[in-house]
């Protein structure tokens, strides 16, 4: 089971009931935070989570509404007793940007590791997550993220017995490690069936609708995508700012065969996103409006 929570779904400036952009993905005690806009630490506490278990923070880009909450967030992590290193992933300039922000948060009791995205597409394996970053089209360098949680095949007891492997080694193989037994090396593939379907979450904000986003969101169980405006009359204004409308996001979700889409990163002028939901669903039925604290649990088949 993979838990996904929108911590903030606002763009540009926070509103009284809408913090700035951030999303939390949790699986088996490991957590990814994507973006860290103003109010993220408050939203995290409001959702009932703690700071310490965050393993990696991924940034789409370095506009303030996506990163301005980081200094306070780092301080809260330190105050929560974190000592383990924290991994940060983002476009080129990551270390320079974060170190500038840390002028107001200089003392934290853990190491920060910086991984800058290289090229148009880059991938990272962190814990159970396979993180793939895709370059999108914004006014500055910006990336969308595809988070895959693979699922290995079922353990085949008959194969383990046929190989004469003792039961105390079964769990090691099932966890993905090889073992030595009676002078031979056994690998997980010796006792596991074919890989089963995993879970995929795609995340994209601050971009025009480009072909690469369809690859990012292909067959995603959940596609979280920006919709700056829902009103079709705001189309030209949206394009000028290198963003997308609800309808444009819906077409991407449809073309990518995503199972479900949440809209996020609304303009402050969009006070009621659901006003435009019916029209958007005429393009992609499984469209839902995101809101701060919106949570789902994605189940493996």
Image (tube, grey):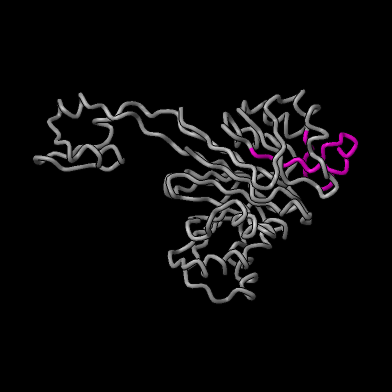
Q: Going by the image, does 72 lie left or right of 164? A: right
Comparing 81 with 106, the one in front is 81
**Left or right: 147 in relation to 250:** left
Residue nearer the viewer, 31 or 87: 31
Where, by quadrant of the figure, is residue 235 drawn? top right
Q: Is residue 1 above or below residue 64?
A: above
- Please give left or right for residue 144 compared with residue 3 in the image: right
Which residue is outermost to the left? Answer: 182
Residue at image coords 45%, 50%:
30
Residue at point 62% right, 60% down? 41
Seen at 17% across and 36% down, the residue is 167
Instruction: Tell which residue pokes out farthest to the right in this image.
Output: 233
Q: Position of residue 142 (x, y in %)?
A: 67, 50
Residue 284 vertical position relative to residue 66 in the rendered view, above or below: above
Please report the residue visible at 47 percent of the width from the left and 43 percent of the height from the top.
130
* Residue 144 shown left or right of residue 170 in the figure: right
The percent coordinates of residue 7 (x first, y second) are: 64, 50
User: Relative to 21, is 211 above or below?
Assistant: above
Percent of width and height locating residue 292: 68, 47
Residue 102 image-quadrant placement: bottom right
The magenta stretch spans which residues?
A: 224-246
| Residue 54 part of the magenta-drawn span | no
- Number of numbered callouts drawn: 0
| Residue 294, position as x, y percentages in the image | 64, 42
- Asked if the stretch drawn in magenta spans residue 244, the answer is yes
């Amino acid at each position: 089971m993979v838990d996904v929570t929108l911590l903030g779904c606002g763009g540009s400036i926070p509103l009284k009931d809408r913090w700035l952009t951030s999303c939390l993905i949790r699986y088996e005690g490991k957590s990814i935070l994507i973006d860290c806009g103003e109010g993220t630490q408050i939203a995290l506490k409001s959702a009932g989570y703690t700071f310490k278990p965050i393993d990696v923070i991924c940034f789409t880009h370095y506009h303030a509404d996506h990163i301005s909450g980081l200094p306070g967030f780092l301080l809260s992590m330190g105050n929560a007793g974190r000592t383990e290193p924290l991994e940060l992933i983002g476009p080129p300039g990551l270390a320079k940007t974060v170190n500038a922000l840390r002028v107001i948060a200089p003392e934290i009791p853990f190491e920060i590791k910086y991984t800058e995205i290289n090229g148009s597409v880059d991938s990272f394996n962190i814990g159970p997550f396979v993180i793939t970053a895709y370059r999108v089209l914004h006014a500055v360098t910006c990336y969308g993220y595809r988070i895959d949680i693979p699922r290995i095949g079922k353990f085949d007891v008959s194969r383990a017995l046929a190989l004469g492997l003792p039961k105390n080694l079964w769990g090691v193989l099932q966890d993905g490690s090889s073992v030595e037994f009676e002078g031979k090396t056994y690998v997980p593939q010796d006792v596991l069936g074919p890989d089963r379907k995993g879970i995929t979450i795609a995340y994209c904000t601050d971009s025009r609708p480009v072909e690469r986003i369809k690859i990012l969101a292909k067959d995603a169980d959940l596609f979280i995508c920006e919709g700056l405006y829902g009103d079709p009359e705001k189309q030209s204004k949206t394009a000028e700012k290198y963003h997308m409308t609800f309808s444009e996001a819906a077409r991407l979700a449809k073309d990518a065969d995503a199972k479900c889409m949440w809209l996020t990163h609304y303009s402050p002028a969009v006070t009621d996103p659901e006003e435009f939901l019916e029209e958007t669903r005429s393009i992609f039925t499984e469209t839902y409006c995101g809101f701060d604290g919106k949570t789902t649990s994605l189940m493996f088949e």
